[in-house]
Image (cartoon, grey):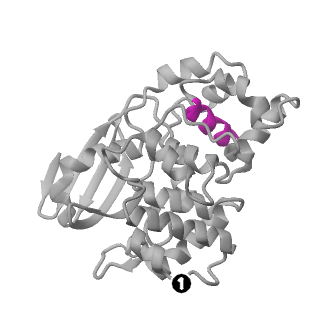
Amino acid sequence: MSTLDDAATLELPYKAPFDWRRLLRFFSGRATPGVETVEDGAYRRAIEWAGDSGTLSVREHPRKRCLVASIEGPVSRHADALAAPIAKMFDLRADPKKIGAALAADPWLAPLIDAAPGLRVPGAWSGFELVVRAIVGQQISVKGATTIIGRLVQRAGERIDGHPHDNTAWRFPTPEALAAVDLAQIGMPGKRVAALQGFAHAVATGDVPLDSATADASELRAALLALPGIGPWTVEYVAMRAWRDPDAWPAWDLVLMQSICARDPSLVRPTQQRTRTDAWRPWRAYAAMHLWNEVADRAGAARGG
């Protein structure tokens, strides 16, 4: 780690191969307007840690097998503590050769592993933000969800005075703010608005300790599923990206269902697909990423997830 006044730089190693281009594409298609951005080959967002704020920027090192995280502002004093959540977000602990070898034993997945051997499961800076996005994104496109998330930030978020990067100059709404704000005419059905604000209230009151470092993942799964408007797809998607469960599988995802059915038309529903997808354990989250990535590569767009 290197430091200057109000700035720090971390070099965070990874196991090769590492598909930075596709990871960045995934984040770019889902970046929350005003809060995070992908530009000039880097991911950037405003962050807060232990009461201090600043900007995080992450890019790939041009020569070494590592990512370079640049932290600006007072939050840079916590650089050592920030190394772990950044590594978690960018899936730097993954062993792609081990995962790839296991999945490539399946003839469906072998060509996908060959095409993108360093594919990672993109994480999330905040579990709360990710669940908000997942609820907003139910039954609409990735682009449509991003538009509505941007409106939520404008209504319930907070602009950061004097922030040096205009594209990341907003704080994502807190659970308390999102639970209380008027979301009329936001562009979502009433039931989804109720689900979103019910979830925000549950996090604000501590009933769902979503970003707690000590919360048990199985208990969090159960707590989320108990909330109105949150189903298994949302919970498994969050388990993939926020809780880093390598075996999470969002079985009711339309793109995944279509991808499997295209390979075997007799497998139409997740209940019929289960035996086939269980063969990918304990790496089903990575299998999901490869199937989503295949569609995104083909469409040239941010589909899937």
> Can residue 42 be seen by looking at this rendering?
no
Q: Main secondary structure of the magenta part?
A: helix
Quarter of the image with the N terminus is top left
Reading the image, the residue beneath label 1 is 182
Residue 42, x across and y down, in percent: 42, 55
Q: Which residue does the image show at 67% across and 75% down from the upper left?
A: 190
Question: Which residues lie in the magenta part?
Answer: 284-294
Q: Is residue 63 left or right of residue 75?
A: right
Q: Which residue does the image show at 39% across and 76% down from the upper left?
A: 166
Q: Nearer the viewer, residue 268 or 46?
A: 268
Which element is circle 1 on?
loop
Q: Is residue 254 left or right of residue 150?
A: right
Q: Is residue 189 above or below residue 238?
A: below
Q: Which residue does the image show at 61% across and 84% down from the upper left?
A: 184
> Can residue 291 be seen by looking at this rendering?
yes
Q: Nearer the viewer, residue 275 or 122?
A: 275
Q: Nearer the viewer, residue 104 or 164?
A: 104
Q: Residue reaching furthest top?
A: 105
Residue 264, x across and y down, in percent: 84, 28
Q: Residue reaching furthest left?
A: 5
Image-quadrant location for residue 276:
top right
Residue type for callout 1: Asp
Residue 228, x across and y down, in percent: 60, 60
Image-quadrant location for residue 194:
bottom right
Q: Is residue 285 located in the magenta-colored stretch of the structure?
A: yes
Q: Which residue does the image show at 55% across and 18% down from the upper left?
A: 101
Q: Is residue 96 located in the magenta-colored stretch of the structure?
A: no
Residue 293, x across and y down, in percent: 64, 41
Q: Is residue 133 above or below residue 112?
A: below
Q: Is residue 240 left or right of residue 253?
A: left
Q: Is residue 298 left or right of residue 128?
A: right
Q: Nearer the viewer, residue 64 or 143?
A: 143
